Amino acid sequence: MPEMISLPSLVASIPAPPFRNLEFAGLTLHGYGLCLGLGIVIAIGVADWVMTREHVDTSRWTTLAFIAVVGGFLGSRFYHVASEPTKFIDHPGDILKLWQGGLGIYGAIAGGALVGLGLAPRFGIPRGIAADAAAPAFLIAQAIGRTGNYLNQELFGRPFNGPWALEVDLIHRPSQYADVATFHPTFLYEALGNLLLFGLFIFLVVRWRERAPGILLPLYVAAYSVVRIIVEPMRIDTAHEWQGVRQNVWVAGALIALGVAVTVWMQRRWRAAGSPGVIIPGRAPRGPRQK
């Protein structure tokens, strides 16, 4: 009797990336870094658009944005190193090799937000509006940055033979899966989730006219953590666990609760104060430019 062929095996899978880095004029351009750079540039533009809608003078925004990016990189690397210290004990120099991957999103959010919001008033940008602008900016940067995980062939999930299965070269497979060719593209799942949330938050920026200033940032933290808590258990890369559950799942769960609580508290506090002076296009006549 001939061997039966399952339907998924007849459908093309996602191929392994054709390159990891680009060579140009004798220089090596790391694909991971290029993806991060593109995501950052687009995110800066998105945040500028949000703040311009609120009549904020953004002439000094680019300078603040790059300072916040540095804070984000430091925070993200610290989070990653703290999560997997054994990888760097014998090779501390690897801490500086950002192009090899290993940036913790939650560390980037914390570092970038603390630096950006802390310095925003010095650059003429109200903290509340800066926080609202950061939410969609973070999401689009994360979505684009995840392409770097594809180029590095990292952060994929369990073995999978579906129509969108990801092919992984043997050298990048965990030793226990050396005989498995295709896996869940978990970085793609997260990127698509981020893109959906990006669309939602742009909608909220435009249409949610009665919101507390800055409320989109804690709401973003909660919403992104929902995506993370769904995708994280599928991953097979090394991670610390507690009670058999990956560390980032615990972090995501805690941040969902915290983000929702802060969002509700901010909105109630804003309404109790009489919804003071927030300029949101479409709700009231535009006021003078904030400086």
Image: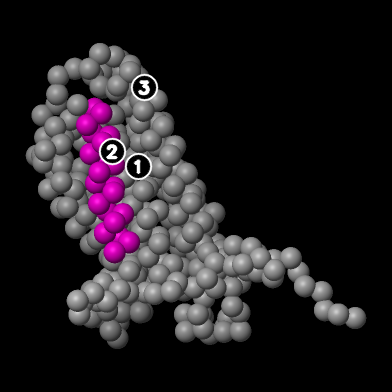
Compare residues 46 and 133 and report the one nearer the observer: 46
| Residue matched to label 3 | 209
Crowding at label 1, few (<14), some or many (≥20) Cα neighbours within 10 Å?
Answer: many
Q: Is residue 39 magenta?
A: yes
Q: CA distance from mark 3 to mark 1?
A: 16 Å
Judge left or right: residue 90 versus residue 256.
left
How far across and down, in percent of the image, does residue 41 sit?
25, 52
Earlier residue among tags 3 and 1: 1
Earlier residue among tags 2 and 3: 2
Judge left or right: residue 138 versus residue 12.
left
Crowding at label 2, few (<14), some or many (≥20) Cα neighbours within 10 Å?
Answer: many
Give, as a three-letter code, the residue at label 1: Pro
Q: Which residue is at 45% across, 54% downward? A: 191
How far across and down, in percent of the image, does residue 103 sit?
33, 65
Q: Which residues are magenta?
A: 34-54
Q: Is residue 126 above or below residue 136?
A: above
Judge left or right: residue 165 versus residue 248.
right
Q: Which residue is at 69% across, 70% downward? A: 9
Crowding at label 3, few (<14), some or many (≥20) Cα neighbours within 10 Å?
Answer: some
Farthest right residue in view: 1
Q: Secondary structure at mark 3?
A: loop
How far across and down, in percent of the image, does residue 197 sit?
44, 43
Q: Is residue 214 above or below residue 288?
A: below
| Residue matched to label 1 | 136
Q: Is residue 90 visible?
A: yes
Question: Would you say the residues marked 3 and 1 are in contact, meaning their CB atoms lie under 8 Å apart?
Answer: no
| Residue matched to label 2 | 133
Magenta span main SS: helix
